[in-house]
Amino acid sequence: MSSSSFAFQKCIAPQCGATYDVHEVQVACPKCGDLLDVQYEWSRVPLPAKLADFQRRWSERNDPVRFSGVWRFHELLPFAAQENIVTVGEGQTLLQQADAVATYVGMDAGCLYLQYEGMNPSGSFKDNGMSAAFTHARMTGAKRAACASTGNTSASLAMYCAVTRMMKAIIFIGTGKISYGKLSQALDYGALTVQIAGDFDDAMARVQEVSRELGIYLVNSVNPFRLEGQKTIMYRVLEALRWEVPDWIVVPGGNLGNSSAFGKAFSELRELGLIDRIPRLAVINAAGADTLYQLYERRHIRWQGGAANMGEVQQFYQEMDTEHRKASTIASAIEINRPVNLRKCLRALEACDGVVRQVSDQEMLDAKAKVGAGGLGCEPASAASVAGVRLLRDQGVIAASDRVVCILTGHQLKDPTATVAYHTTDQEQFNQVLASRGVRRASFANRAVAVPNDLGQIVKAIRLYS
Ligand code: F0G
């Protein structure tokens, strides 16, 4: 494809519906302030006749655009000409059938799959979206890029800047709020790291102001191009399932970019006649950061064709402020109380007949240990998806024989502190990192065995434990 002329940006509010050129840099509708979508005149896009045609691209994987798990699907996110595409080899990820985890959550063997986005170059799903945002940034000639982050977006931004040398990375993080694995990435890749005395929600509000004032390209998921890249996670899930639509997609919810992108991906595929049904979507909050759960399941806020009751949402936020309720969970990646993509996520939940649940830190860490024991390590937030399936099985919402895909959003090495504290024999370390968050036990801990530096004792210990 040589042209981006069939792409445009459009306000998601049906009563506004303002459109903008694809080259404009906006993270909100200048007319009404709502979120923007990237949209296409599909009738002009040279689409393959069926999804399976994308598979053939593998044979051309010496071409970086074909190698990319994002740009292999270029026709489904056709906002850029081929020569503007920025890729560092993202999206080489894996869908693994996980029978041991299936048993843990009460699913039949062969029915639970884990989509391991930790395999991305910066270790999280963010690279899918970042390659798309960088592609758009290149179209607009941006020189500096910023984000607020709980750690993974910043690691991804910093990495794309370091590899491509296209832009300078400026990242905003809450003091003490991001795990060491992620902080170390941003520092190593050379990002300008701004630590705000506050949490993610504070940093997110500030970075939007600063980007506006200084004309810096914002790569948080309010950037609609990010979400175009994240749609491809679903294309790869379908590809791995031989283009059969699963029954459920289960994803952790933080800023709600993924859930929004997944809903858009499936709505578009359905509209294009490339799939015949849409899977159900389950978004899983941490109990300590459960805004979506409260709004969707408790207050029954629905998209309603764009007429969602935002007055009640505002009232909820006001109560949160009055009571000084701050997000708090061991799953720092999703420690977010004001999800910026709330409205898009409501739209996705409607399109996918979705449900929202919340899980405790205890449930997440136990699920994380089970995922790790199965061989695909993930960070605490990612395990929310598995803990969520367990809950939905208990509640009978998901059937044991349903085909369920959990998205493992980030790599295990992102947050070693949480993992080591779970498995430790050091009660003080456990108390400090986990008991302080209400985690009472580590039922699936794999504890190190302490032995004296003595051959006989070592041999005895190995005989005893193996
Ligand atoms: N899982 C991980 C590992 C994440 O890093 C994030 C978000 C999420 C889940 C939530 O995804 O926002 O699409 O609902 N991390 C952002 C960051 C906020 O700054 O890295 P979402």
Image (cartoon, rainbow, N blue to C red):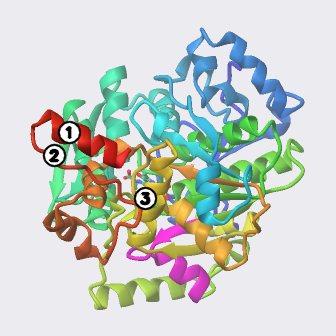
User: Label 1: few (<14), some or many (≥20) within 10 Å?
Assistant: some
Snapshot quadrant of residue 163: top left
Mark-to-mark CA distance, 1 and 3: 37 Å
Q: Residue at x 22, y 36 (%)?
A: 191
Instruction: Report if the CB atoms under discs 1 and 2 are less than 8 Å apart.
Output: yes
Q: Earlier in the sequence, mark 1 or mark 2?
A: 2
Q: Which residue is mark 3?
A: 381
Instruction: Report if the CB atoms under discs 2 and 3 are less than 8 Å apart.
Output: no
Q: Which residue is mark 1?
A: 458
Q: Nearer the viewer, mark 2 or mark 3?
A: 2
Mark-to-mark CA distance, 1 and 2: 6 Å
Element class at badge 2: loop
Q: Which residue is mark 2?
A: 451
- Which residues are the magenta region? 283-298
Residue type (three-letter) at the residue carrying disc 2: Val
Assess whether residue 287 is covered by the magenta stretch. yes
Residue 458 is at least partly visible in this image: yes
| Residue toward you, 179 or 340 | 179
Q: Quadrant of the C terminus?
A: top left
